[in-house]
Image: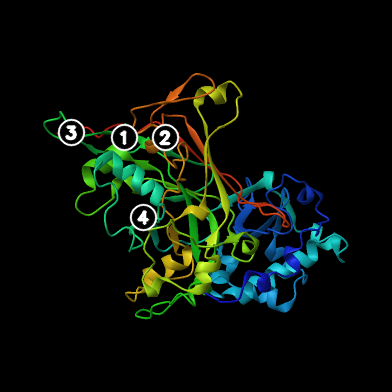
Amino acid sequence: MTDTPTSARLDRTHDAALQSWVVSANGPDTEFPIQNLPLGIFRRAGSSERFRPGAAIGDQVVDLLALRDAGLLAADAAEALAGTEDGSLNALMGRGRAARVALRQALSDGLREGAAGRAAWQAALVGQADAEMAVPARIGDYTDFYTSIHHATAVGRMFRPDNPLLPNYRWVPIGYHGRASSIGVSGQAFRRPLGQTKGADDATPVLRPCQRLDYELEMGIFVSRPNALGEPVGMADAEDHLFGLCLFNDWSARDIQAWEYQPLGPFLAKSFASTVSPWIVTLEALTPFRSAFERAEGEPAPLPYLDSPANQREGAFDIQLEVWLQTATMRAAGQPHQRLMRSNFRDAYWTVAQLIAHHTVNGCNLQPGDMFGSGTLSGPDAGQGGSLLELSDGGKRPLVLANGEQRRFLEDGDSVMLRGRGERAGFRSIGFGACEGRVLPSPAVPAAAA
């Protein structure tokens, strides 16, 4: 993790006064001002075009390959896009920070008010409403962590009232290797999963649809440069292997998990679906929202391989997070999503640099496009649980929605939307776009073999 302070990494692209000739990027409520420029993969909706890289600006997408092919990008920015013709950002990710900075500065210079060549650049715009988005990278491997001590304590208290937090939690960034193939992009609709469950009064387990389906509010963390097998990444270099962040919903089947997770951890309870937001906000765009890494008094200091002055000074990210719910009844009545909670990524117990350093300390080799989940990001206060499991106290106290409906866990037709935003005085606020998924009815339980 570089020891260069935030102030030295700010450049002309972060200027809060900067305006774009894309008028929608200048509104106070936009998530995608010119100071953001997140990256994703898109094509025109309804077309058979190949997916291609784009950047969000206001309500538009900039077709990056169209800019390159028209000769509108400087050589280093054009070179940064080599290999992204395959419909993923992996090649760009693997080139590291210098390539991202070159591309970001070229986009900022071309999209700012008064820039030359506006007509040519305008030809590369596609309305976001007319775009179909894809998962932004080929995710070869996915690791889910457990970085919120508030979530870990709240859930542990349900099952171990006298000892809610296991002793290793304060020393080890806990994680497990998840399933990458079922990660989909915002707009994903998935079937309620089937699985084995066993109630306390059941003589034997049964195969049935999940009865305690839940969401998990998380951040997705994308890896950029690889490390060689057997070569750990230290804290001083950890963020050189970080590309950027997105929103991530790691849907969970709580009743299936309760029966299967011992002794090896989650399996079918997690692998049926996960949802990412389509835009990756790069590490450079997040520079203004860095925050000190702080723990409550009495918490132990990390072991030396997980510590550094730079991480202490600004290893965390000040990102406001929200969960919104719309039921099928609300949708039929034309009612929007209702906000259920708000928390902040800043309150995580471990930083992204620490996750990279720990993941590789045994020699594990990370690849461009690998993704980490932060784990459920709950806040310290009541009502800041990042899952229904917490908000309903394990289903004991249902949430009462504004229209009178109640929820202990998710029902068929429910849509969950995650939102995230970086805000700090003196800088433009930036967002991540929506991360939304909807629950469909379960498939039929397989008939018994003849």
Label 3 or label 1, whichever lies nearer to me, is 1
According to the picture, the residue beneath numbered tag 2 turns out to be 391
Toward the front, the furthest residue is 297
Toward the top, the furthest residue is 404
Is 292 above or below relative to 252? below
According to the picture, the residue beneath numbered tag 1 turns out to be 210
Q: CA distance from mark 4 to mark 1?
A: 19 Å
Q: CA distance from mark 4 to mark 2?
A: 26 Å
According to the picture, the residue beneath numbered tag 3 turns out to be 448
- Nearest the viewer among 369 and 316 is 316
Q: Inspect the image, locate mark 3, and give the three-letter code of the amino acid beneath it.
A: Ala
Q: Quadrant of residue 426?
A: bottom right
Q: Residue at x 43, y 71 (%)?
A: 307
Q: CA distance from mark 1 to mark 2?
A: 19 Å
Q: In the rendering, which numbered label is found on residue 124?
A: none
Q: Secondary structure at mark 4?
A: loop
Q: Quadrant of residue 38?
A: bottom right
Q: Secondary structure at mark 3?
A: loop
Label 3 or label 2, whichever lies nearer to me, is 2
Q: Residue at x 77, y 72 (%)?
A: 71
Q: CA distance from mark 3 to mark 2?
A: 38 Å
Residue 260 spot, x, y in % from top left: 22, 45
Count neighbours of disc 4 (C-alpha within 10 A) and say few if under 14, some if 14 to 19, many if 20 or more. some
Residue 97 spot, x, y in % from top left: 59, 74
According to the picture, the residue beneath numbered tag 4 turns out to be 179
Among numbered discs 4 and 2, the one appearing first in the sequence = 4
